[in-house]
Image (tube, rainbow, N blue to C red):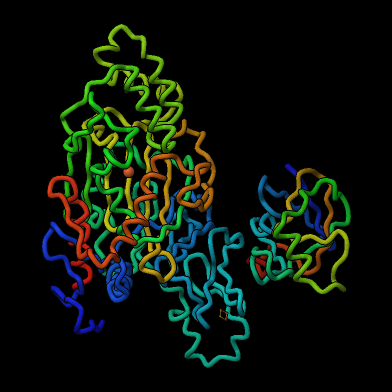
Amino acid sequence: MAVAPDRESGRGGVPFAMKDPLHVPRERYYDRAFFELERERLWPHVWQMACRLEEIPASGDFVEYEICDQSIIVVRQADGSIGAFFNACRHRATELAKGDGRFPGGQIVCPFHGWRWNLDGSSSFVFGAEGFAPECLDPDDLRLRECLVDTWGGCVWINMDPDAPPLLDGLAPVPAMLDPLGVENMRVWWWKEVILDANWKLAQEAFLEGYHTMQTHPQIRRGPDDEAPPQLLAYETYARGHSSFRNGTQRVKMTPDQSLELSRIFWEGQDAMTLEKDIRVMASVRDHPDAAQSFPRLAVDAIYEDAAARGIPIAPYGPAMKLWGGEVFAFPNYFVLPQFANALCYRSRPYGDDPERCRFEVWSLTTYPEGEEPGPPQLQGRYAKDDTEHWGLIPRQDFSNIERQQRGLHSRSFEQLRLATEWERAISNMHESLDRHLER
Amino acid sequence: MTRVRVEPLGADLEPEPGESVIEAAWRLGYQWPTTCWGQAECMLCRVDVIAGEEATVPQGADEELALRTRLPASAQRPGLRLACRLQVRGDGVVLRKRGVVAPGPTGAP
Ligand code: FES
Ligand SMILES: [Fe+2]
């Protein structure tokens, strides 16, 4: 890719490269050439979450996954495995399937001239084949072009690069951190999205730190004087751009009523991680004789007892529970925030061909009693960032900053983000990993 | 179990809950005219419901739209349904459909 001479170019010809972990050049969030470099060198070579597994339970079920100018169809095969194919007819390029749905006859049919493929991508029919030169109908060449595909964490992941490392290597250490928390058993409670006038990275960076909580979410501040010391969270960064944060060892002492109130604010504020059913269970131990001393412990025990009684396959007690209330980020754009038998998940993608717009999705997951898992989830809807009916207070507060930030980036006064070494390292870690992709 | 008769072949199909008539036929190895294979696009799977209409599940929006817009007026008539969308909820449904081929050595899909 040609880089205009007036652009600052760093290693490997990457424009606006990261020079140190303390600063992020602003152009990374709006420059067209940078965006196009991501489109060529990041997205076609990285494992990305394509859909939830429960969206395609039966043979022939499909979901279209779109990323920038590419469309991939993810198809459940007759043998239960999953295939992923570039969504382009081998005849004249028509996209074969849109959105989601089923191929009930086990055939993927082009709507233009009726060419067909089996679910495994092999060509099954060419209408008027006698009208083509044989070299145009070589069966291998007619096969739908495949992507790498694998599953982890209740999701289907795809990678367009045949030489990519295996999924679990690419995601490490994320699976090892989250598997003990039972993420495989979680199912969608709800799923919504918002279109934001902001770069996809800028949007997700609002969720890579808890440092903004004090000012952005005053209702969930913890602490005796309504002060939330930022060091309540412990941040870690990993290779390949992944990161996490969790509650640190320093605890704010709360009465049972304060704990319950905070839980209620989280539930009402996002209907995720802590759900109404959890509040009911936690409230049941409020008057326990030991509540004043050890309410958090009693509340967790009560949640486990309730899960056992209802047949909910909550993951066993273990050190991974320290991630409850924290977050795990899987580069380039997927988040899991676990709590009890629940989790909140995010995915941020470019929207359209615009570096300054993104499609930001939110899933609230929970674990259902065995045998009572709901059917395939549907995107509930696309809601405006300030829609009070469909977004809780917490995401609305987060969304409200993002577009202002994107506009602020263009201010003639502004050059680069400056990041806290202690609280915001996950952001530069993500950018550094991005540059390693762009350098290739 | 609900049973559907397909004339003139005289085939009896037993669609499972949630299964369309064409899917039941495919599952049992019948061939059924189609070029879109279940996307409510090609109209070739359409059938006449000649008896037992009260035991059919009413049309959804996509079937209604397809039948209204993807067939010439001369082909439209009461009782017309798409086999790739038609579901039944009781016995007694009889359909007329030419071109359905029974399972067999040459009839396997
Ligand atoms: S473009 Fe697909 S069949 Fe012609
Ligand atoms: Fe926030």
Query: Can you see residue A433?
Result: yes
In the rendered image, residue B54, in percent from the top left (x then y), is placed at 85, 46
B106 is higher (above) or lower (below) than A137: above
Query: Can you see residue A240?
Result: no
Specify the quadrant of the image occupied by residue B60.
Answer: bottom right
Q: Quadrant of the N terminus of chain B?
A: top right
Q: Residue at x 17, y 39 (%)?
A: A234
Specify the quadrant of the image occupied by residue A438.
Answer: bottom left
In the rendered image, residue A325, in percent from the top left (x then y), is placed at 29, 35
Q: Is residue A101 left or right of residue A428?
A: right
Number of marks in the image?
0
A222 is higher (above) or lower (below) than A335: above
In the rendered image, residue A157, in percent from the top left (x then y), is placed at 36, 57
Specify the quadrant of the image occupied by residue A108.
Answer: bottom right
Q: Is residue A22 left or right of residue B54?
A: left
Q: Quadrant of the C terminus of chain B?
A: bottom right
Q: Residue at x 72, y 49 (%)?
A: B14
Q: Which of these two is toward me, A345 or A213?
A: A213
Q: Residue at x 41, y 45 (%)?
A: A396
Q: Which of these two is toward me, A353 or B75?
A: A353
Ligand 2's quadrant: top left
In the rendered image, residue A345, in percent from the top left (x then y), is placed at 37, 46
Q: Is residue A69 left or right of residue B91?
A: left
Q: Is residue A189 left or right of residue A208?
A: right
